[in-house]
Structure formats: structure tokens, C-alpha cells
Amino acid sequence: MKIRVVSSREEIPTLNPNEKVIHLAFRPSNKDVFMLAETCPKMEAIQLPKSYRRTVSKSIEMFLEMQKINLLEGDVWGHRKDINEYYNVSQNVLEKIQELKADRFSNEMIAEKLSRESKLNSDMILYILSRKGAELA
């Protein structure tokens, strides 16, 4: 699974319309979120660092909810945007999710366990778990 890292609002109009998961490395305004939703109509989730997530307005939260776009809290630790514009969720993490799911762990337990073991926030792990099982493979 790939997460598109966007480090400035100037990048939004240049995004591929097929992007599904986007990490914003800047504090977005309401206008930025609207432009992002317009540019990427297939978007399923936006991830923001914790400090930025707290400043998102209620109107944007409602807009994203109506558009069925998840608003996630988290970061892409150790990612260098100058090397690659995507952060890749490792296959090991996806396999570990499948293993724990097969062992009948609850989604919350899986998220808690893997957020300690991987660089992913529990919100992102819960989002991955919410996607169709076929997409995890």
C-alpha cells in the first residue's frame, strides 16, 4: 500500500486523480482540503500529523465524513520526500495484520500491537483493517 506524501499546497493541483491515501505534511486550510477532494475524487483517507489534526475545523470534518473520506492522525516517520514522493507500507506489516486477523485478534488489539512494532500510527492500521481483505494481500 502506498501513501502519497504532499509537503506543500502547491503540489495539490499536480496530484494524480487516482490517489487513495494522502499524507499532508503541512497544516491545510479549508480551501486546501476542498481542492484536494476535487483533485483526487477517489481519495479514501487523509493523514495529518497529530498537531495539525487537532486544528482541523468541524466543517471540514463534516465535509470529509459526507465524502466518506477518513481523517487519520499519524506521521510517516523516516520518509524522505526528496527521494520518493510515496511512503510504502511494508509487506511485512500487511502480512502481520493478516496473521493477527487469522488468530482472531480484535482490530483494536492489532492496531495497538502493530503501532508499537511498526512506524505506523494506530489510526492508519485501523484504516488498513477497514479496507477489503483482498486489498491486504
Image (cartoon, rainbow, N blue to C red):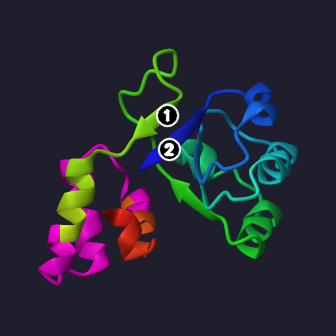
- Residue 102 in picture, x, y percent from top left: 16, 79
Dot 2: within a 10 Å radius of its alpha carbon, few (fewer than 14), some, or many (20 or more) residues?
Answer: some
Q: Residue furthest left?
A: 103
- Residue 6 in picture, x, y percent from top left: 63, 33
Question: Which residue type does callout 1 highlight?
Answer: Tyr
Q: What secondary structure characterizes most of the magenta part? A: helix
Question: Left or right: 125 with respect to 102?
Answer: right
Query: Which residue is tagged 1?
Result: 86
Magenta region, residue range: 99-124
Q: Which mark is residue 3?
A: 2
The secondary structure type at the circle numbered 2 is: strand
Question: Left or right: 17 with respect to 59?
Answer: left
Q: Residue at x 60, y 54 (%)?
A: 20
- Residue 83 in picture, x, y percent from top left: 46, 17
In the picture shown, does residue 31 fall above or below 131? above
- Is there CB contact under 8 Å for labels 1 and 2? yes
